Amino acid sequence: MAVVKLFGAWLSPYVYKVIWALKLKGIPYEYIEEDLSNKSPLLLQYNPIHKKVPVLVHDGKPIYESTVILRYIDEIWPQNPLLPANPYDRAVALFWIKFADDKNPIIAKLYRTEGEEQQAVVKEWLEMLEAMEEHALIGGKKFFGGDEINMVDIAFCMVAHWLGVFEDTAGLKVFEPHKFPQVSSWIQNFKSVPIIKDNLPDTDKIVAYLKRRKEMLLTSKSN
Amino acid sequence: MAGELVLLDFWPSPFGMRSRIALAEKGIPYEYREEDLRNKSDLLLQMNPVHKKIPVLIHNGKPVCESVIQVQYIDEVWHDKAPLIPSDPYQRAVARFWVDFVDKKIYDLGSKIWKTKGEEQANAKKEFIECLKLLEGELGDKTYFGGESLGYVDVALVPFYTWFYAYEKCGDFSIEAECPKMIAWVKRCMQKESVAKSLPDQEKVYEFVLQLKKLFGIE
């Protein structure tokens, strides 16, 4: 049987996307925790261009970029499909996945920016939430995938879990549930799915870590 | 199967060019509609309400947005002719990675080259060339990124060639001098009718860039 290895980091939402996909399909894998401040030679060998996690190694072959990994997993292990079968519906799903993927690196800056820069990030967050509320979650669906979660739900993981983390770290409230009722319902539904609920990083632990990291970044900026 | 196909586009857009090439490769007839981006049509705003951007591919009245998704969609629906995306899942993952790389790097760095000056421009040029060299490494000795025939990465990357002359003039450097393999690959792509007829002239794009610079007050 082919071996599946996942190089990850405990606080990365991109890594959790892959963990959820592997667990949803029941694929056994070996997890290797990376210290991102001291990356292993193996990781750098597998992902020389971006040098990042997650990296999936299947049969000795590396795949990286979380969405590329998810699509590979979905194609190799077709049980519990994560994308619609119909080409048009798949194109729509891929649109929302790309939308989330393009926003994620920007919105992740919420906890480590200040002033005008932070306001610009808040604006991006609100645009994302508005688009989800007005265009993506139409029809009052339980999940983007319908009755079961799919790759689109997984792609919006930052909204589901890390937004709260960033808000706590920054001491800022961005998400007002009454303004985004559909998104609010979706977050609750998503986090109730057993595989998601049982595989989320501890909020207090990440907030403590990010607060320390934010201090370090701000100190080094002022020096 | 063909149904009604409309492409909402803007002639210098490298993203629009991707879909034009994919449709031409497969010999699919469609209606090309030029958008005035300072005065976007109601149809565009209706079909792409989230981004309000071109290109939009409208198939039987239903919109497909984002050029990389359009190319994949075209490849899936018209799968019997000139396949662009590899059939092997691992090769597919590799191709998707490189298309994602082109999307993340080439457009933004190229934009910085014509929009900025001094150190910012110098850094953009350096990184741009580094990215092209990485792509040259991936190409290796192959005729195309797709092997013997045009593939997903070729279609995603070759449109940016139409902006190279503008980058070179604004940045005062030669891309061919730094990346000869890349230019050799471009020339092979340009020999294909589907590519040649889908891409505008580099000089025309440069004139367009000069107009943009005037408009934005960039020297």
Image (cartoon, coloured by chain):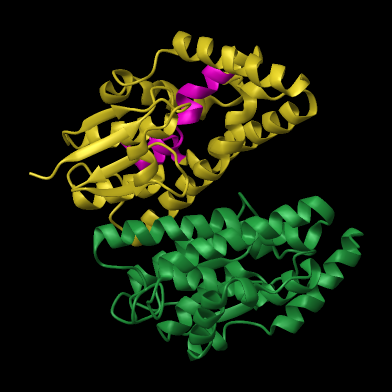
Q: What residue sits 46% from the left and 22% below the top? A: A161
Q: What residue sits 46% from the left and 50% below the top? A: A49
**Image quarter in which the C terminus of chain B is found:** bottom right
Q: Work out whether residue B22 or residue B196 is closer to the camera in this orientation and state it.
A: B196
Q: Is residue A121 above or below residue B174?
A: above
Name the quadrant containing residue B103: bottom right
Q: What residue sits 63% from the left and 60% below the top? A: B128
Q: Work out whether residue A37 or residue A109 is closer to the camera in this orientation and state it.
A: A37
Q: Percent position (x, y) of residue B114?
A: 78, 63
Q: Percent position (x, y) of residue A176?
A: 61, 19
- Display colour for chain B: green
Q: Percent position (x, y) of residue B33?
A: 64, 77
Whether residue A153 is visible, yes or no, is: yes
Magenta residues? Answer: A139-166
Whether residue B63 is visible, yes or no, is: no
Q: Percent position (x, y) of residue B99?
A: 46, 60
Q: Furthest-left residue in view? A: A1
Q: Is A114 situated left or right of A52 in this image?
A: right
Q: Work out whether residue A216 or residue B22 is closer to the camera in this orientation and state it.
A: A216
Q: Main secondary structure of the magenta part?
A: helix
Q: Is residue B128 above or below residue A106?
A: below
Q: Is A9 situated left or right of A158 in this image?
A: left
Q: Is residue B59 above or below residue A103?
A: below
**Image quarter in which the N terminus of chain B is found:** bottom left
Q: What residue sits 70% from the left and 81% below the top? A: B202
- Residue A67 shown in magenta: no
Chain identifier, yellow in the render: A
Q: Is A88 situated left or right of B49 in this image?
A: left
